[in-house]
Structures are given as C-alpha cells and as structure tokens.
Image (cartoon, coloured by chain):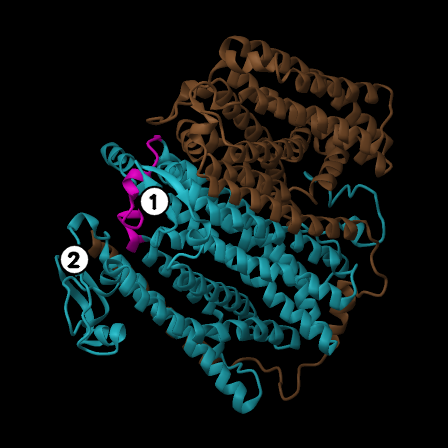
Amino acid sequence: MSPSPEAIAVGVILFVVIAAYALFGGADFGGGIWDLLAGSVEHGAKPRWLIDEAITPVWEANHVWLIFVLVLLWTAFPTAFAAIMTALFVPLSLSLLGIVLRGVGFAFRHTAQRLRMEQLTGALFAASSLITPFFMGTVVGAVVTGQVPVHPAGNVLAAWTSPTAILTGFLFVAACAYVSAVFLVPEALQRGHQDLTHYFAVRATAAGLVTGALAGGTFAELSTSAPHVFTRLTGIALPLVAVSIAAGIAVLCMIWLRWYHPLGLRVVAAIAVAAVVWGWGLAQYPYLFPTSLLLAAGSAPTASLVTEFVVTGLAILLVAPGFVLLYLLQQRRVLTAAETDADLRMAADLEPAGVGQVAVAPPPFGARMTTALVLTMLAIRAIRDLFSARGRR
Amino acid sequence: MGAMVHVLAASPVPARSQMGSSLGFHIILACFGVAFAAVTMTAEWIGIKRGDAAALLLARRWSKVMAVLVAVGAVSGTVLSYEMGLLWPGLMGRFGAVIGLPFSVEGIFFFLEAIFVGVYLYGWQRLPPWVHWWSGMPIVVAGILGAISVVAANSWMNSPAGYTLSHGKITQVNPVAVYFNTSTPYETTHMLLAAYMVTGFLVAGVYAAGLLRGRRDRYHRLGFAIPFTIAGIAAPLQVMMGDVVARFISQNQPVKFAAMEYIPRTRRDAPEWLGGILIHGHVYFGAAIPAFDSMLVGFSPRTRVIGWDSVPADQRPPLPTLIHLSFDLMVGMGLFLFALAAWQGWWWWFHRRLLVTPWFLVPAALGGVAAVTAMEAGWVVTEVGRQPWIVYHVLLVSNAVTPAGGVSVTLWVVLVLYGVLTVVSIGVPMIMSRRWRRGVAAEEQAEQVPYGPSPADAGPAQGVPRASAGGPAA
C-alpha cells in the first residue's frame, strides 16, 4: 500500500513548516538560552539587550508555526497525532508549560518594565527556553525510534527516556543556541556593536561544535535504536545530511574568517537546520512511526488532505502580502507629520469638557446607596450560587 | 482523599475541568481579539474625521492594550491546540480529519490577525491617517472570520455532519458540509455578538469607573461612549438572537433544552422555571410561569416540549441544576445589559447627552463583568448540556478522553498558570494606564508592547543599550 500523492504533498508541507519552526522558533528559544547564560546583571545587560531587540518583533509569529504543525498533524494524520499525544503526554505537557511560562515572562518584561518582578520573569523566560526545546527533542526522538505505539493505552515513559530520545533533546537545545547565536552576529553588526558581534561569534562557534558532536552521537545511537531511519539516512537521505554538515562547517568557516555577510550567514545556517529536518522526514518515509504505522494507513481521507493543501495555499496568498507590508513598515522611518503620543495628550488634555457638561463630583449619597445596593445584590447572588452548588451534591 | 483522587483520575472529570477552564479563560481574550479592533478603529475614525485628539489618543492606547491581549491570547490558544490532543486523543484520532478542517481555516485568520496587529501598531506614525485606519480593517475581518471558524468546529460537535464512517474509520469528508453544519449559523452569530458585548462593556466599564471618580473630561466620556455604544447596539440583537438560538436548540438538541428549562417529561403547557434547584425530580426555590415555556418554543401553550425522559438515563446531561441556573444567569445578565443600553439610548435620544448619574454609571461599570458572566454561563449551558456526548449522538466523552495518567496534575498546573495569565492580562494594562495617568510623555512614547515597534525605532534613532530601563534584569 503506497501513500497517495495528496498524503505525500501534505507530508512535505508539514516538514516545511517544522523546518520553519525549528529555525525561527529555535532562534527564539536560543535567544532565551543565551539570556540565561549571559551572567550577572551588569555583565549581561548588553547581550540581553540585543537578544531582546532581535526577538521582540518575531516572538509571537513563532507560535503560529507550532499551531500550524499541530493542526496539520491532527487533520492530515489523526491516528499518529492521537498516539503521540497519549504516549508522550508527559514531555508534551512539559514543553507546553515552557511555552506558557515563556509567554508570561516575555509579556511582563515588555510592558511592565518597572515591575519588581522583572528579574523573576526574566529568569522564567530564560529557563523555559531550555525546557521547551529539550522536551520537544525527546518527543521527536521517541517518534524516530518507533517507540510510540499506534494505539497506546496510556503514558509510555520508556519511549521518551531512551538514550536516543534524551540525546535528541540535548541536540535540540544545542541547535537552538547555535542558530540563535549565528543570527545574533549580524544583528549586532547591523546595530554597530563590534564587541557584541565578537561575543556572539565566539558563542556561535562553541554552540556549533557542541551541536555537531551531539548530532554525531545521536546519529551513532540511531544505528541501533532506529535501524530503518539509519539505513535511509545513510542511503537516500545522505545528500541532505551531507548538505547539512557542509552548511554547518561553512558557517563556522565564515565566522572564523570574520566574513559576517548578514544574508549569507543566515541563509547558510538556515540550510544547515532545514536540511537535517528534511533528512529526518525523508528517512522516515514511508512511515509515520517507523515500521509500525505507514503513511498510507495513517492519513486522512483525500478531501481533508486537499483542504489542507488549499488552506496552505490561501495562507501563503493572504499572509505573504501582510508580511511584506509589515517588513516595509519596519524599515520605514517615522513620518514627521504624525503626532506623537505627547502631542495628542497635549491636545486632548487642553480641550475643555464638552458642551453642557460640567465636571461635578458625583452626589455622595446616591453613589453610596448604589454601591450598597449592588453589593447586596452581589452578596445575594453569591449566596444563591453557593446554595445551588450544595444542592447539586 | 487518595481514593477520591484515584476515582477522579479514572473519569473524564479532570480532563473536562481542564478543558473547561482553559476555554473559559481563552474565550475572554478571544473576544478582545475578535472585537477590540472594531472598537479601536471607531475611536480612530472619530479622531481623524473630527480632528479629535482625545479619540486618537484613546485609539492609540487601546491598540497597545489590544496587542498585549492578543499576545496572551496566542499563548492560551497554543495551550488549547495542545489540549485538543493531550486531553481528547479519542476525539482527534477518530475525527481529526473532520474537526481539524475548521481549525485549519481559523489558522489562516489568526495568522492574518497577528500580522495586521503588527502593521497597525507599526503604522501609527509611519502611515497617513486614513491609510492607517484601513490597515486595521483586516484585523476586524480576520477576527470575525476566525471566530466563525472556531465556533464552527464547536457547532460540528453539536451537529456532526459531512463525513462517512465505515468500520469506525472516516472514509469520506465533505469540508463544506463540516464547516456549514446546521448549528453553525446560530452558534457563530450568538458568539460574535457576545464578543462585541464582552469587549464593549468591559472597556466601557473601565471608563465608567473613571467617570465615577470624577474624571469627566472628553477623553473619559469618549472612552466610555464608544465601546458602550458598540456593545449597546449588540445587546438588543443578542437578546433576539438568544431567543432564536433557544428555539433552535429545542428542535436540534431537545434533551439539552429540557435540562435548560427543567422539562423532565415530554408535555404540553410546559412551565417556564425562573431559578430553582432540582433535587430528586422536584424544583425547589423556583418560580414557574405556567405554559410560558411552550409559548416561547412554539408561540402557543399547546406546543409539545420534549422532556429528558425521551432518552435513557445514561444519555441525559448531568447536573441539570447547573445547566438551568447557568441558562437563567445568561438570560438575566443579557436582559440587564439590554436594559442598561436602552436607558443610555433613551437618554441620548431625548437629551443628546451622556447619562453620567452614578445610578447609571455604577451598573455600567459592572456591565463588563455581567457580559463575561453571561458568556461563560452560556458556554456552560452548551458544553455541559451536550454531555455525555463529545460529538452529539456519535462519540461519548468517556471514549474520547486520554488514557494517559496525569491529567489531575496538569489540571492544577493549568489552573495556576491561568491565574498567572489573568494577572498578566489585567495587570499589564493596569500598569500601562497608571503610567499614562502619571503623564510623563516620554514614558508613553517609549512603551513597548508585543508586535509593536521597539522604542528605539519609534522615536529618533538611539541605538544605545538602555542600561537601566532596557536591560532585561535591570
């Protein structure tokens, strides 16, 4: 039973989106990791500032990639989705916890700069940047090694605590740090900070070497834990693996030679990540779960697959112009004619209260009566609700 | 205690509670995602049209609050998409290919919305006024269409359609029939109006509180009048729509309707119960209007209303008291808000002035809470009323719930996290408003929100690390 072309097409889309998430989401998480490692408050202020500047415009968009992955997975490959979500309940819940904590830390840091909690939220943000990629890595490791049963009866702890899965977890963390550091090098350069450029170049090199070592370890581990995937990785998917390795080395060379071409550096690093993700996809083919669930057996009816295809097309058609517009606006200077908030405030506050309206203090008696009335009503409602709750039991 | 936890873990109750609390939280933020842009753009329209600085300032500040709320909403939305699988693998594994379709469509609109919130925020000082106004339009449209898509998924669970099942496996899917199932027009309209009411009354409530404290300038009066007007227009429509929806449910899901109205046995001259607690088949503490329920359903006291005895006991929704009281609460709050809007409308019609007596402002300040209560109660009615089915007459909740242990743990984690998220989504705008009132212009200009431009590129180029304010851990 060979998979339908529609299933393959949606599978391809899925892996393109996963690669995008690995890249952009990965850079995002990596930023948090470098934030965590930036050291003391004074010492780390500058790199933290750069990370903040670079992540802010994009951090939200990265949730969209993840949601897209989930929606594609559950619509196109529902059996696999349900099995993963059941067997890997624990690591998925923990990665979700990381996402939420990150969002909370980030939202607070940005809007409430004066808050005492800032240090706590900063730590929250950084720590959750470790949790999420690590546990997502263990999930991928569990799927690759075929340890997720098609119809799990509950949690399968062994699936995501195998050496391969744990190694994959560490690999994901290292890869995030690597991508992020590489992306931050040109960011620092464009803002004219030589010291920060050097700072992140050193870290990109270190993270690159660690990632390479972990990737090698995972690869060796796969030979015993996932023979099907290993065979295809060294067979049909070998070109992609080679491209990824070559791109990884090229990035390191560019950094050693201090050739910080902003676009070149980013694109080559992106190729290194995307190629390995696609290599993984190709190596798993024709299985959703290697050797237990075939793509053909686990995919949705054709109409659903076609709809996903159309939805993706529409998304590109509708969203792309929006992205272009946003990008153009970000590049554009502030219009001089536009009022600043301060001008508006001046104009608004100078304006007297409108016609026929005199600012009088509310009559205290009426207000007090109303408050009392409302409070009484609330009390009655609360009592009634409590009473009915007791009545239910 | 240990035994109780065990019993809970074996039943779908923790999963249902977790999903319920997640949805109940997310839906409030989602309302802002759907309707806040329209409120903001109305203010901007007035500001541009009349050269009104107060209205423009309101619009600009609201857009920042909108960004914070949409950002928190994106996080809680991510939680929900995970939970669909983590809690209900039995639903997603069997029907993912069907119910996933409206969610996919929603994905496009959420994407669009997030991008155009960014465009709108960046555009404030970079686009000419009317161009900027139009750049907000996609947020309004995407908000509405996105809401329709998500609610369509819920409607499908009430009126499953558009698929062929053979040997327990979905073999054919008709996406259009899935999306436009029988419940879709009713549920989506009801929810869209609710979103406008919740947003309008909540925002208006903030400024009503300001007016009560004696801040009676044009800024506060506009800040009250604009959202209140929008919500006030939605309120009477919602009362009518609610009536239509209830009649639809009496036909489409008669057992749910029976629980809503305390109709144990199928009968004519069915009474309408106001309040009341059902204990052992008897209603205590309630007032019954004879034959009025039959009147409401079929415009005649002789209308036959189906009772829950029409199905076996194991197919009836649990907790009829909860369903009925939630229904009454929703209707009561809806009528209260309608009355509030009518009062203000009357005053405006005859006096052309804003009604600012505390007798009106105190309930108006609480209008937002009332609207949220009504919406939450409404969701309790539709969700608990659908039990024990997750897909009506097709799949039982108990067959959809995850067999994985640990939901009773995640439930508590989720509750704590939502507590924190609530603090964020109320606390951050509050801190912002305090900063606005303090009146240091530079602070407001330098304010940074998710999606928005960073202070460095909003003002003249600075490019220097903000050692004190910008350092993350400073």
Mark 2 packing: few (<14 Cα in 10 Å), some, or many (20+)? some
Specify the subunit that label 1 lies on: B
| Magenta span contains residue B82 | no
Chain A image colour: brown
**Quarter of the image where one finds residue B471:** top right
Q: Is B102 positioned to the left or the right of B295 in the image?
A: right
Range shown magenta: B384-405
Q: How many numbered callouts?
A: 2
Left-right relation of B141 to B274: right
Disc number at residue B371?
none
The residue located at (44%, 55%) in the rendering is: B152
Chain that the image shows in cyan: B
Between disc 1 and disc 2, the foreground one is 2
* B219 relative to A384, above or below: below
Q: Position of residue B35 (x, y in %)?
A: 55, 63
Of the numbered discs 1 and 2, the one sitting upstream in the chain is 1
Q: Amino acid at mark 2?
A: Ser
Assess whether residue B399 is covered by the magenta stretch: yes
Question: Could you tell me which secondary element the residue under label 2 belongs to?
Answer: helix
Label 2 resides on the chain identified as B
Residue corresponding to mark 1: B16
Q: Is residue B374 visible?
A: yes
Residue sitting nearer the eye, A25 or B429: A25
Residue at the spot of label 2: B310
Residue at x 37%, y 39% (from the top left corner):
B170
